[in-house]
Image: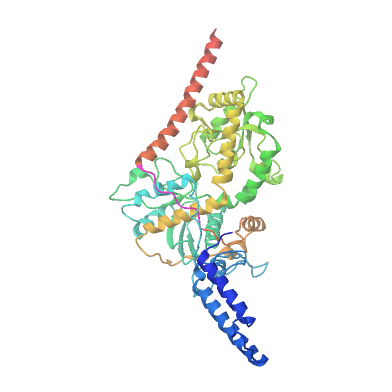
């Protein structure tokens, strides 16, 4: 508790109170004289009203200096609390209502003349926390257009790579699909953007973009230069030779075809699954399960499986999704695949959505080198979050990594925990949405024109996607649906890397890989030397 009134003011109040008491009891009447009872009562009433008014004026005039005391809360403090309560943004429920269960489609409910969503004007007492470090790569993704901005002509040139074309105006979403109509990649990417708009009403800017939902990145940097900037294209992954703008992939909202749950409930199950078997009690081998036919690197990985002649410390299992679907996906539960001390990640045709599930297991990930990256991957560091494996020497690298980890269990467990914590904390769904929001805001800042809805585009909304969907797809959509608007500001976007900072990050990553390669080569030479003696 604190007191804002000064001793002089307190003394003044005491004096006034004493005077009022004496007046009320007639002590200030002339000595030796008595007044009639009726006159005395009237005088008392007049005096009481007068003194009360004086006290009230005094309190009001000094209310700015009053605080909480034993007597209670002063008027200004009370008004301040009321004002804060009224100005504090209140989350609102996000609802979805289908007209009826048999409707083939649902009309987006908002009237064409309805006002745009009003942004929440937040009065936070402290700034939002800074976003994870990998958000800084948003600036790098958009660097090709930093000096030129993005024109409508540039956007149109990206159409040759497009799966869909999207325009967002005043929180309303319009699309034209060129390929993959009704595929989960399209539908759940649409759904994710609709959830973002519902979660942050009024905060998502107007924009026009082209999106590629296929596996491979498309826009090669060598095909363009400063005088002919590349077309801006959003995609799920990129490599050192492409300039696609990274965006979270559709599986964060679920993947019905493989029965992979949305990220939020799946991460809860992963956390529970990790607690079932302590790391030291897990199988002391490296585990991988997936489709071996999705790219040459996976076919090469199969050669590392245990045989009668050689054990490379790897346990490789082929995943047949057709049979798995027939059996009710009983053997493909991702939360029940954390029973080995080590997990293997290997790319598919390009990047693989499996990376986040593998690395969330609290087991060190033996990460087979890939040229493809997705948005969060740029926050991972070899030697801390994963163990790097050379793509051209997988089997030897896996064997050494497992041998090293089993001999250095404390360090191995720390690596697994760092990886698991990264995905539980840095890639939680709040940050996925904030990454989307910041990427779109920074992208929209570069647009040199006001987007409009082209002819032939269709408006989509949550009702139009969910109400006519199959029962299984609908269940995934509803499970991943945001339930309330977000009353807190998004995390604060960190600044771009300076050239020196970016060089240090890349150098540190390269040095960590080289260190592991040196250890592995030395161990291999020792093993070969022992065989020859």
Task: Determine if residue 156 is in view.
Answer: no
- Spot occupied by residue 270 in the image (x, y as percentages of width and height): 65, 43
Which one is nearer the viewer's eye here, 334 or 425?
425
- Spot occupied by residue 302 in the image (x, y as percentages of width and height): 58, 30
**Magenta span has 229?**
no
Q: Would you say the magenta stretch is mainly helix, strand or loop? A: loop
- Spot occupied by residue 394 in the image (x, y as percentages of width and height): 53, 28
Task: Determine if residue 127 is in view.
Answer: yes
Q: Residue at x 60, y 28 (%)?
A: 410
Q: Image quarter for residue 354?
A: top right
Q: Residue at x 51, y 50 (%)?
A: 248
Residue sticking out furthest to the left: 227
Q: Residue at x 61, y 55 (%)?
A: 480
Q: Image quarter for residue 292?
A: top right
Vertical order, 278 against 107 (above or below): above
Which one is nearer the viewer's eye here, 385 or 42?
42
Q: Quadrant of the C terminus?
A: top right
Range covered by the magenta-colored residues: 489-498
């Amino acid at each position: 508790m604190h007191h804002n009134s000064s001793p002089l003011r307190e003394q003044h109040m005491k004096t006034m109170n004493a005077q009022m008491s004496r007046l009320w009891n007639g002590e200030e009447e002339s000595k030796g004289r008595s007044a009639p009872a009726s006159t005395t009562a009237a005088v008392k009433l007049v005096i009481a009203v007068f003194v009360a008014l004086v006290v009230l004026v005094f309190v009001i005039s000094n209310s700015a200096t009053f605080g909480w005391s034993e007597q209670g809360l002063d008027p200004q403090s009370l008004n301040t609390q009321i004002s804060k309560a009224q100005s504090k943004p209140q989350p609102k429920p996000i609802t979805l209502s289908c007209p009826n269960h048999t409707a083939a489609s649902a009309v987006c409910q908002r009237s064409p003349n309805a006002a745009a969503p009003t942004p929440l004007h937040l009065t936070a007492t402290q700034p939002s926390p800074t976003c994870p470090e990998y958000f800084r790569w948003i600036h790098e993704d958009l660097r090709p257009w930093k000096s030129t901005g993005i024109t409508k002509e540039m956007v149109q040139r990206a159409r040759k790579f497009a799966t869909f074309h999207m325009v967002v105006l005043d929180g309303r979403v319009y699309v034209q699909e060129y390929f993959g109509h009704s595929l989960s990649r399209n539908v759940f990417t649409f759904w994710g953007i609709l959830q973002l708009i519902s979660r942050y009403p009024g905060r998502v800017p107007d924009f026009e973009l082209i999106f590629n939902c296929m596996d491979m990145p498309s826009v090669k940097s060598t095909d363009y230069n400063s005088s002919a900037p590349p077309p801006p294209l959003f995609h799920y992954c990129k490599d050192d030779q492409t300039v696609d703008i990274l965006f979270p992939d559709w599986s964060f909202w679920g993947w019905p075809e493989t029965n992979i749950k949305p990220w939020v409930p799946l991460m809860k199950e992963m956390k529970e699954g990790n607690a079932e078997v302590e790391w030291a009690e897990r199988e002391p081998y490296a585990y991988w399960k997936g489709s071996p036919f999705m790219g040459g690197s996976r076919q090469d990985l199969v050669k590392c499986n245990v045989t009668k002649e050689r054990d490379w410390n790897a346990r490789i299992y082929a995943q047949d999704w057709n049979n798995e679907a027939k059996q009710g996906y009983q053997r493909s539960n991702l939360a029940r695949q954390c029973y080995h001390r080590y997990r293997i990640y290997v790319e598919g045709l390009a990047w693989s959505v499996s990376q986040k599930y593998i690395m969330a297991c609290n087991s060190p990930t033996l990460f087979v080198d890939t040229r493809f990256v997705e948005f969060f991957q740029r926050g991972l560091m070899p030697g801390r979050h994963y163990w790097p494996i050379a793509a051209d020497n997988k089997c030897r690298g896996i064997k050494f990594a497992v041998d090293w980890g089993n001999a250095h269990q404390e360090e191995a467990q720390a690596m697994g925990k760092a990886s698991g914590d990264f995905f539980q904390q840095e890639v939680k769904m709040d940050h996925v949405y904030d990454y989307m929001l910041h990427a779109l805001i920074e992208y929209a800042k570069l647009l040199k024109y006001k987007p409009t809805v082209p002819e032939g585009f269709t408006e989509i909304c949550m009702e139009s996607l969910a109400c006519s969907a199959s029962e299984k797809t609908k269940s995934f959509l509803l499970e991943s649906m945001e339930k309330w608007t977000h009353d807190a500001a998004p995390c604060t976007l960190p600044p771009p890397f300076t050239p020196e900072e970016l060089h240090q990050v890349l150098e540190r990553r390269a040095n960590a890989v080289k260190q592991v390669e040196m250890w592995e080569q030395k161990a291999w030479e020792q093993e070969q030397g022992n065989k020859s003696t």
